[in-house]
Structures are given as structure tokens and as C-alpha cells.
Image: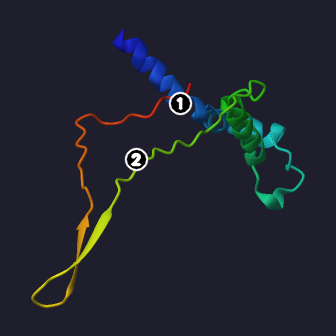
Amino acid sequence: MKNAIVIIALMLLVKPVIPVLEYIINYDYIANVLCENKEKPELHCNGKCHLMKELAKASEDEKPVSGKKSFHQETELLFIQPLHNISFRVFILPESNKVAILCNNNYSLLAETSIFHPPAFI
């Protein structure tokens, strides 16, 4: 079982390199017969144009089929927690005639032990 998994993994890793290996093995044939620029020796193409076409074809084969369109929609969720009323009381201290303002902000802590996981879209 492990051997089959290793062989499949190696095939997936080697698949993009197959055109390059084919170019190396059949270098003379590709450079002399399949090269498109053999009439222009100053370019020193030596079949690299054919190699680029094969690599492009291999990368096109790896792309997912575009005929099957997937509809992807994103939705933003906004969670709102209502604010508590903040009340201010003004009173004057009798001995210093200074105004003091007391603020009652009704602070509360909601300690959650669970972690929020957003819903998964399929």
C-alpha cells in the first residue's frame, strides 16, 4: 500500500518534468526535425521552441476544465452587540464648590470559552 502511494506521488511530481526529459532524450531529433527555427541558425534555438510548446501544452492539461463554472459568492457578516446605557450624574461637592461628574458605564465582560468558527461554504 505504501509503495503504491509513493509511486503515485512520484508520478505527480515527475509529470511536469516529462517534456524536459523527452527534450533531453530526443535532443538531436527535436533540434533537427521539429525545431521551427532551423532556417535561422543565428537564434541558437536548437528545439527550445518545441520544448516551450510542449511545456505550455502540459500546463494547459493541468488546469481545471473551464466548462464547469463554479459560482462563488462571499457574504459579509456583521455581529453587533448592543451598547449599555451610560449615565452621567453631575453634583456639586459642598466644601469646595467644584463640580464632580460620576460616570456609570455598566462595564460587563462576556468571557467565552469556545472559539467561534464561521460556517464553511461548499
Upstream in sequence: badge 1 or badge 2: 1
Q: Nearer the viewer, mark 1 or mark 2?
A: 2
Q: Residue at x 34, y 53 (%)?
A: 84
Q: Name the residue under label 1.
A: 14
Q: Residue at x 87, y 56 (%)?
A: 40
Q: Residue at x 23, y 49 (%)?
A: 109
Question: Could you tell me how far apart the alpha carbons at marks 1 and 2 are, in whole angstroms?
Answer: 54 Å
Q: Mark 2 points at which residue?
A: 81
Task: Please tell me which residue lies in front, 78 or 54.
Answer: 78
| Residue 8 to residue 43: above or below | above
Q: Which residue is drawn at 22% across and 43% down?
A: 111
Query: What x and y, as percent, mark residue 78?
Result: 50, 45
Amino acid type of the residue that numbered disc 1 sits on in the rendered structure: Val
| Residue 9 to residue 95: above or below | above
The chosen color scheme is rainbow
Task: Please tell me which residue lies in front, 116 or 2.
Answer: 116
Task: Please tell me which residue lies in front, 47 or 95.
Answer: 95
Is label 1 in a helix, a strand or a loop?
Answer: helix
Is label 2 in a helix, a strand or a loop?
Answer: loop
Q: Quadrant of the C terminus?
A: top right
Q: How crowded is mark 1: few (under 14 residues within 10 Å), some or many (20 or more)?
A: few
Amino acid type of the residue that numbered disc 2 sits on in the rendered structure: Gln
Query: What x and y, as percent, mark residue 94?
Result: 12, 85
In the image, is 23 to the left or to the right of 103? right
In the image, is 85 to the left or to the right of 53? left
Residue extending furthest top?
1
Task: Please tell me which residue lies in front, 89 or 53.
Answer: 89
Is the residue under label 2 in contact with that under label 1 (CB below 8 Å)? no
Q: Which of the 4 image quadrants contains residue 91?
A: bottom left
Residue extending furthest front?
94
Q: How crowded is mark 2: few (under 14 residues within 10 Å), some or many (20 or more)?
A: few
